Image: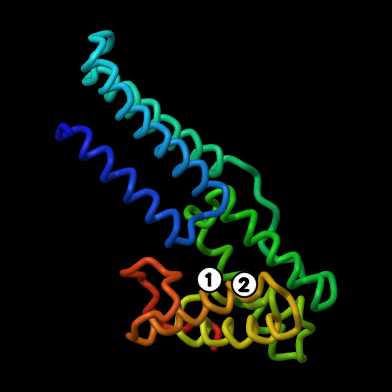
Amino acid sequence: MTKNQILALVLLLVIIFLGATIEFAGFIGFLLLTPLSLLLFVVLAAELISKHLKLFSFKNIRKIILSFWCAAVILILSAGFLTPAPPAVDTSGDTSQQLKYAYETDQFDRNTSKWLFYPQRDQERLALTLELIKRQELAPEDAYHAAYILQHGTCQDHFLEAYDLAYIASEAGIEKAHQLKLQAQDRYLLASGQQQMHGTQFQPLPIVRECEGF
């Protein structure tokens, strides 16, 4: 294999590894990883074709593919930045409604890359969630929503609370809460200066921060 083929293959393996280990921003992560994987595969195929059939210039194909992918990244991030966002929180309903709404806007922000440009929206959801969990014991579905928001918190106390709530939801039969429980536990361990147990987080993760709201 040539150096270009080896480099492309290594990059492809790195992308597969990242896709399996990093919690990406929902649909944005999928859009960025999948095309890049396909393009690297095309690079490998194009070089083989150009080598044996002399039909293409690998150098030109590589430049074109890289240019298209960079343009795609810019367009995707720009689309997320320009997409109108609903308010981060809505305090007009009861506890369940407020937590569900905050969870949905959290999902929206990660699917549109809003969290990259407006981190204060996470802080609004965090402050509301911390206030709501102090008021009453949460139902399992509410606990799951609260845990999801808290795992996007700022310090180990938030992650520990997220783990406790995800554990409650998981024990109550909410299947999706099991993975969240593992993620929250790993974040707590990393924030505490320990090694993660389940390999759900990409290191180094900048989560050793001052607690806000506790």
Q: Which residue is mark 1?
A: 152
Q: Residue 34, percent across and down?
A: 47, 41
Q: Amino acid at mark 1?
A: His
Residue in view at x 83 percent, y 69 percent? 92
64 in relation to 208, above or below: above
Residues tagged 2 and 1 counted as in contact (Cβ below 8 A):
yes
Q: Amino acid at mark 2?
A: Tyr
Distance from Cα at disc 2 to Cα at disc 1: 7 Å
Q: Residue 37, percent across and down?
A: 40, 39
SS state under label 1 = loop
Q: Which residue is mark 2?
A: 148
Q: Count the numbered circles shown.
A: 2
Please give left or right for residue 183 compared with residue 52 in the image: right
SS state under label 2 = helix
Residue in view at x 39 percent, y 82 percent? 191
Residue in front for this viewpoint, 113 or 63: 63
Residue in view at x 52 percent, y 54 percent? 25
195 in relation to 57, above or below: below
Residue in front for this viewpoint, 97 or 1: 1
Please give left or right for residue 10 compared with residue 75 in the image: left
Badge 1: residue crowd in 10 Å (few <14, some 14–19, many ≥20)? some
Q: Residue 66, percent across and down?
A: 32, 29
Quadrant (top left/top right/bottom left/bottom right) for the N terminus: top left
Q: Residue 91, percent across and down?
A: 77, 71
209 in relation to 57, above or below: below
Residue in view at x 65 percent, y 84 percent? 165
Residue in front for this viewpoint, 187 or 200: 200
Quadrant (top left/top right/bottom left/bottom right) for the C terminus: bottom right
The part of the image, by quadrant, that contains residue 147 is bottom right
The part of the image, by quadrant, that contains residue 127 is bottom right
